[in-house]
Amino acid sequence: MSIALALYIHIPWCVQTCPYCDFNSHQLKGGIPEDEYIANLLADLDQDIPLITHNGNIRPISSIFIGGGTPSLLSVTAMSKLLHGVKQRLPINENAEISMEANPGTAEAAKFLGFTQAGINRMSIGVQSFEQKHLSALGRIHDAQHSQNALTFARELPLRSFNADIMHGLPEQSLQNALDDLTQAIAHKPPHLSWYQLTIEPNTRFHSKPPVLPDEDLLWEIQLHGQALLQSKGYEQYEVSAYGQNGHRCEQNLNYWRFSDYLGIGCGAHGKITNLSDFSISRTEKVKHPKGYMNLTKPYMHKHIAVNDNELAFEFFMNRFRLLEACPKDAFLQHTGRSLNAGEQNIIKKLVQKGLLEESVNTWQVSDLGRRYLNTVLEEFV
């Protein structure tokens, strides 16, 4: 059995931290220590290579995603040095998707062409909204014109794809506001759209001082109308918050949700690795703070936790059922090394009987009702 392997690289710095963000981001004070951080990223990768070596061979990488933070704050020279170092160390599939997140500020957009020359072939642009009052409420430092310019520029670049990130359910947002944001994004014809609801996460400023958000009825109305608009414009929903045109799905996202493996390097980066010799699965997490991460007297690995056998079904379906595509029944065996036990099979039967799952001879698929109550579906496996 083979399991696909992706690489995630975390760049932790932002110009300022948004009040809704619970990612590992650190407000920039002065310049980014690019040379030092990239040297540590590559040393981190060197330490992890034994985790992805099987029968003496390093497993090939199917996709790379550079996230943050704000990766586009890096210089083109630094990005080129990083990707060159990665390619020296790992076998990268010839057609691998290599993505990076980018903010729409004009100074960063001017570097976009340089990033493609460094090896980036897909960009994800953090638009969030085209309405200034919503951008201000979200703590974004760009304006609507920056986003318009960045999306226009991205369309002209030699990229295989690009994504526009749009949020809904924002403070004081109406149905028309939400649909206007989507309409403006669609006008730029991004091959991929991430359209997701603002949620209040612990350890964020919005958690300590919650804004007034649309009520549940309005949120559901936004969801239904937004999905209908996207479908009418040729965007196929393939995951809870991801929509692609003409097969433009994000390979890195598919890798996560299909319960495949990914190596995570950089401050606070998470990974999921399967030992192909015995199918034991581990979750990894790197040292979180940049100062600690770049202190070479300490290991980069902060946590290396085995996934217990009784957690496997929850872990697998928590990921797999985010996808709208049917789940092949043999995918559980392929990704965990074992079959469903009697208790897990009974849970599946119960979910089918309740109309939350649909079953064919070879597949399971979350029903329309199950997608609306996905947490209820997943709680059955806890």
Image: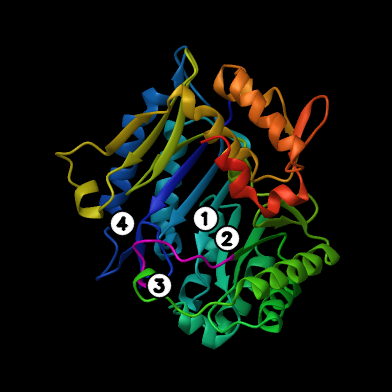
The residue to which callout 1 is attached is: 100
Residue 80, horizontal then vertical, whole percent:
44, 51
Front of the two marks 2 and 3: 3
Q: Looking at the image, can residue 324 be seen?
A: yes
How far apart are the alpha carbons under marks 2 and 4? 21 Å
Q: Amino acid at mark 4?
A: Glu
The residue to which callout 4 is attached is: 34
The residue to which callout 3 is attached is: 206
- The answer to whether marks 1 and 3 mark residues whose Cβ atoms lie closer than 8 Å is no
Of mark 2 and mark 4, the one earlier in the sequence is: 4
Q: Quadrant of residue 335?
A: top right
Of mark 2 and mark 3, the one earlier in the sequence is: 2
Figure check: 11 above or below 363: below
Residue lying furthest left? 297
Q: Residue at x 35, y 40 (%)?
A: 285
Q: Looking at the image, can residue 260 be seen?
A: no
Q: Amino acid at mark 3?
A: Phe
- The answer to whether marks 2 and 3 mark residues whose Cβ atoms lie closer than 8 Å is no
